[in-house]
Image (cartoon, rainbow, N blue to C red):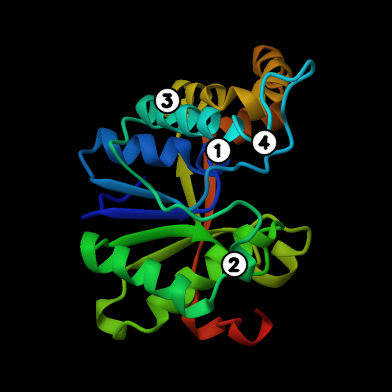
């Protein structure tokens, strides 16, 4: 069961980050009437997929991906999308205090009861890890009694070894169509993957069904804080 929240703040670095791990969760919150603010830090201008034959170049890709994200948010029913204006593949080089302030300002404005981001050091991409560090540091600085819950996404190869199994599992079977629509909206990055995935769903492949029916998170454990490791 997905708990109703006061307000959910999502901080992720790239268009389509939301589609893979939390589109069903976002859709469910919106169906429940929960306000959701999505702060997307970059326009994903360094995305690998430019098409074959190419449909974009480095100059045109950002606007394509921006439009795709807006379409994805429409699919989820999310109407508070923020473009934060940072550059793809450079977040790890941003000043730490600048990044913490960016997140702190968002928290101060939206007063969320839940924040969702990646888990620092266990989310594979340097932009993912840098975004996650800023989120953790911003929430950590709040008085403990005022902190929102923090759900994190982790998928590095050693995640289970470090964190164990996810403790938050959302059943999103009812939102499967919206998750598919969200992924499909990011066509520049997902078109080939979705062709194969839709066939797997048609074939009732267990792993595909599992991915589209459940979304998994780690609630951040402040007693098992890995600040020294990131």
**Residue 77: horizontal and vertical position, in percent?**
31, 30
**Residue 191: horizontal and vertical position, in percent?**
66, 20
Number of numbered labels in the structure image = 4
Label 3 residue SS: helix
Label 1 residue SS: loop
Residue displayed at 31% across by 75% down: 147
Q: CA distance from mark 2 to mark 3?
A: 26 Å
Q: CA distance from mark 4 to mark 2?
A: 23 Å
Residue displayed at 72% across by 31% down: 49
Q: Which residue is mark 4?
A: 58
Residue displayed at 51% across by 31% down: 63
**Residue 144: horizontal and vertical position, in percent?**
31, 84
Mark 1 or 4, nearer chain start = 1
**Residue 201: horizontal and vertical position, in percent?**
65, 18
Mark 3 or 1, nearer chain start = 1
Mark 2 or 1, nearer chain start = 1
Q: CA distance from mark 4 to mark 3?
A: 21 Å
Label 2 residue SS: helix
Q: Which residue is mark 3?
A: 71
> Dot 4: within a 10 Å radius of its alpha carbon, few (fewer than 14), some, or many (20 or more) residues?
few
Q: Quadrant of residue 95?
A: bottom right
Q: Which numbered disc, 1 or 4, marks the residue closer to the eye? A: 4
Mark 2 or 3, nearer chain start = 3
> Dot 1: within a 10 Å radius of its alpha carbon, few (fewer than 14), some, or many (20 or more) residues?
many
Q: Which residue is mark 1?
A: 16
- In this picture, is 79 found above or below 56? below
Q: Which residue is mark 2?
A: 130
Mark 4 or 2, nearer chain start = 4
- In this picture, is 202 found above or below 123? above
Specify the quadrant that holds the N terminus: top left
Q: CA distance from mark 2 to mark 1?
A: 17 Å
């Amino acid at each position: 069961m997905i708990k109703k929240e006061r307000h959910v703040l999502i901080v992720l670095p790239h268009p389509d980050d939301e589609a893979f791990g939390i589109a069903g969760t976002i859709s469910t919150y919106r169906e429940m009437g929960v306000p959701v603010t999505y702060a997307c830090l970059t326009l994903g201008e360094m995305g690998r997929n430019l098409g074959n034959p190419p449909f974009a170049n480095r100059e045109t890709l950002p606007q394509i991906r921006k439009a795709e994200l807006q379409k994805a948010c429409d699919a989820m029913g999310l109407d508070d999308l923020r473009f934060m204006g940072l550059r793809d593949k450079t977040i790890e080089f941003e000043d730490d205090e600048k990044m913490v302030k960016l997140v702190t300002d968002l928290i101060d404005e939206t007063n969320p009861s839940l924040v969702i981001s990646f888990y620092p050091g266990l989310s594979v991409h340097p932009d993912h890890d840098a975004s996650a560090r800023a989120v953790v540091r911003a929430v950590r600085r709040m008085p403990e009694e005022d902190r929102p819950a923090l759900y994190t996404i982790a998928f590095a190869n050693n995640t289970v070894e470090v964190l164990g199994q996810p403790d938050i599992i959302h059943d999103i079977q009812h939102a499967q169509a919206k998750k598919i629509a969200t992924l499909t909206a990011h066509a520049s990055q997902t078109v080939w993957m979705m062709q194969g995935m839709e066939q797997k769903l048609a074939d009732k492949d267990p792993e595909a069904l599992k991915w589209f029916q459940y979304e998994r998170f780690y609630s951040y454990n402040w007693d098992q804080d890995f600040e020294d490791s990131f």
